[in-house]
Each structure stands twice: as structure tokens, then as C-alpha cells.
Image (tube, rainbow, N blue to C red):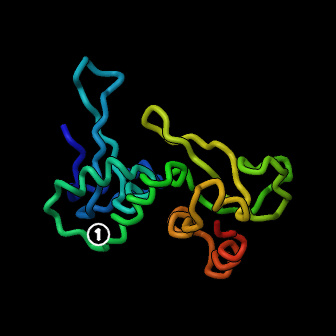
Amino acid sequence: MAHTIERATSARSKCRGCGERIANGDLRLGERLPNPFGDEGQEMTHWFHLACAAYRRPQPFLDALATTEEPIEDRETLEREATAGVQFHRLPRCNSAERAATGRAACRQCKEPIAKDSWRISLLYYEDGRFSPSGYVHPKCAAAFFETADIMPRVRRFSPALGEEDLAEIQKEIVAL
């Protein structure tokens, strides 16, 4: 069965991208995957908010978008972000921004330590139907790591606790290619 975009029939499902509940009636992406615990040929569905799907699972999102007849608010923006995620293969790994709690983590790009209380961008890998944390990058190394400097929509989406001043500070630190 193909991936699908449909309205949530209840508010019980959680988004695999951000962990928040998907409200009843909201549009969501259902990514169909083989069920490793079921009989051969059985499938399971992972649900995502549309924005989370465009950022975290761009190819399944684009596949479902091509076949849906649902009117989607911000369709062009979501399609552009998903297309960028396919074009720049590391971009879907971009997660949230935060201040480093210690100085022990090293940047995945430059291998230098990330100083305590400085900004860092966390990374996630998608393996076997789940997201796993996989380290950090300096904001100044983000453009080289992700192969694009346009990561702020993702940082904004997955860092809801950050204010506009924090986001502006992070944006200043990101160096364009």
C-alpha cells in the first residue's frame, strides 16, 4: 500500500517526527512500512504532521503529495522543503538547537569540541522506523555539514521553546557556503 495523506480520525496518534499528538481532523502523512513483527506482507503505518514529514521523511512525503487530492495549506512551502531534503541528503538529520550543557560533545563536521553554553544543532538518524540521536554540529559548521545554509525552518519547527532572539542569534552564527 502506498503512503497516504489523510485527516486524522481521532487525536490518539502521535507524530513520529516531533512526538506531539496529531489533532483530530488535521492532515497527516501515513508512511507505510513492512511490519517486522507481523506475518510476511503485513504493513504498519507511521503517522507524521505534514510539516514534520516534509522535514524528516521528504521522499515518502513527496510520494504521497503526488497522489493526494486533499487541499493542503502551505503546499508549495512544504513541497519546497521536502525537495530540499531529498536534494541535500543530510538535511533531514537536522533537529533542534540548544545550548551545550557540557563541553564534552564534538562537532560532527569539524571534530572540534562544542564549548559549554554555546549553541549547537542536534542531529537525528532514521533507522528501522525510528529516529536516533547522533551528535551535534556547531551552527558555524551547519552549512558545510548539511550542504545548505537554509536550515532555520527545521530548527524553528523542532525547537519550539526558543524565542525569536535565540533564533536570530543562531541564524547569525550559520555561515553560508
- Quarter that holds the C terminus: bottom right
> What's the residue at 38%, 52% (across, down)?
58
Give the residue number, with chain letter if any, for mark 1. Answer: 75
Picture coordinates of residue 33 (x, y %)?
Answer: 31, 34
Above/below status of 39 relative to 141: above
> What's the residue at 65%, 74% (across, down)?
171
- Under circle 1, the secondary element is helix
Residue that extends furthest to the left in the rendered view of this protein: 69
Q: Could you say which quadrant of the image residue 100 lies in?
A: bottom right
Picture coordinates of residue 159 (x, y %)?
Answer: 58, 65
> What's the residue at 54%, 49% (across, down)?
90
Taking depth in this image into account, of 2 and 140 the one nearest to the observer is 140
Mark 1 residue crowding within 10 angstroms, few (<14) / some (14–19) / many (20+): few
State left or right for residue 29 relative to residue 70.
Answer: right
Residue that extends furthest to the top in the rendered view of this protein: 39
**Residue 104 seen in the current view:** yes
State left or right for residue 43 relative to residue 59.
Answer: left
**Residue 159 seen in the current view:** no
Residue that extends furthest to the front in the rendered view of this protein: 177
Picture coordinates of residue 121 (x, y %)?
Answer: 66, 58
- Quarter that holds the N terminus: top left
Residue type, numbered disc 1? Arg
Above/below status of 173 relative to 113: below
